[in-house]
Image: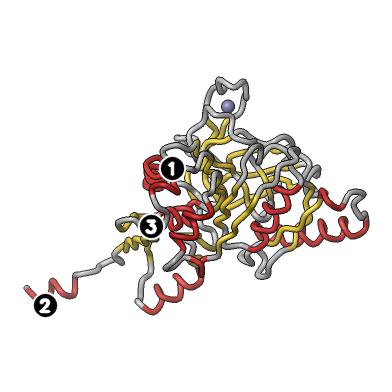
Amino acid sequence: MAKHIEERADAATAARERLKTFIAHPPEDARLWGIRTTSGTTGGEPLIVPHHYPSMRGRIFKEEKRMLQCYGSMSSRLSFTHLSHIRDTADELVSLSLDGADLGPGLDRALDEFGADIIIGYPSFVARVCALMSAGARARVVHVRLSGEFIDSGLRHLFEERFANADTTSMYVSAETGRLSTFPCGHLPLNRYHPAPGVTIEIAEPGDDGAGDILVSKDGREELVPFRRYRVGDTGRIVPGSCPCGEAVTFEVLGRSGHDYLKLAGAIVRREEVERVARRLGLREYFLEGSLKMRGNTPAGALELSIVPPEGAGEEAAARLA
Ligand SMILES: [Zn+2]
């Protein structure tokens, strides 16, 4: 019998269980706990997930002095601001958090004055912000830390070119599950990761190329209640061989499998909306593929719709022409 897979509907039930467990066992050191919320695409409402910080502490921020945060989500901004306060060095880390509404005239000067040495955020948001940064402001950045979205080759080239003095790394994280990959080991390209301690990655029904849906298991050390073979909604594969850093397991994220939504250039494209439009257009069989394209300096989401012709399509027109 096939082993059970936790689907997105199960995630809402599990999140409520995590919250109940957290309330029943108040933390000893509240400084080391945080609350994450999800965007609401899982389970129809934002989920509240308490989580424990110690494994992240002292790892994500070291000697940086000025951090620019590029997240649309308030929960992520608060989380990283808190993390920056509990780092191991005594030096102050000043943080500037941007909202989508901040991206406009005057921001270039503010970013110049702020002089960030580290930028963290969603890749598409960082790409929009870097279009507004002067060459001088970009040159001061030494770390770019990305998470939360797939990084395609267009974005990768953009970051390499725009942040020439920075090491650009990514981590595999989702709002429901929290951190899934280790801190970057320095040997892996973007979109390739090692599982974090306590995390197991499996691929459901892999094809000939080894690719399939990513299933995540995570012990309860950070979120109290374990995840068991949870289908996160991304496709990926296990990369053969071990890494020069000594890690035995490497996995690669290939993209979003889009069970119920796609995140694209900071927008959410919901499956039910696509289906509604397709019905209005009378489409029966179709494929929709999303990708990020650059329009000059600005990344934009592109949706490509491929239509499969219905049986006998065009015969009526051909008969009329005959
Ligand atoms: Zn490695």
Q: Tell me the mark number nearer the camera, choosing from 3 and 1.
A: 1
Residue marked by disc 3 = 299
Q: Amino acid at mark 3?
A: Pro
Counting from the top left corner in percent of width and height, residue 67 is at 59, 49
Tell me the crowding category of disc 1: few under 14, some 14 to 19, or many 20 or more residues within 10 angstroms, Cα based: some
* 229 versus 47 height, above or below: above
Q: Considering the numbered disc 2 on the image, is that residue within a helix, a strand or a loop? A: helix
Q: Tell me the mark number nearer the camera, choosing from 3 and 2.
A: 3
Q: Residue at x 55, y 65 (%)?
A: 99
Residue 139's disc number: 1
Q: Considering the numbered disc 3 on the image, is that residue within a helix, a strand or a loop? A: strand
Q: Tell me the mark number nearer the camera, choosing from 2 and 1.
A: 1
Q: Residue at x 51, y 31 (%)?
A: 188
Residue marked by disc 2 = 320
Left or right of 214 in this view: 168 = left
Tell me the crowding category of disc 2: few under 14, some 14 to 19, or many 20 or more residues within 10 angstroms, Cα based: few
Counting from the top left corner in percent of width and height, residue 24 is at 93, 58
Q: Quadrant of the N terminus?
A: top right
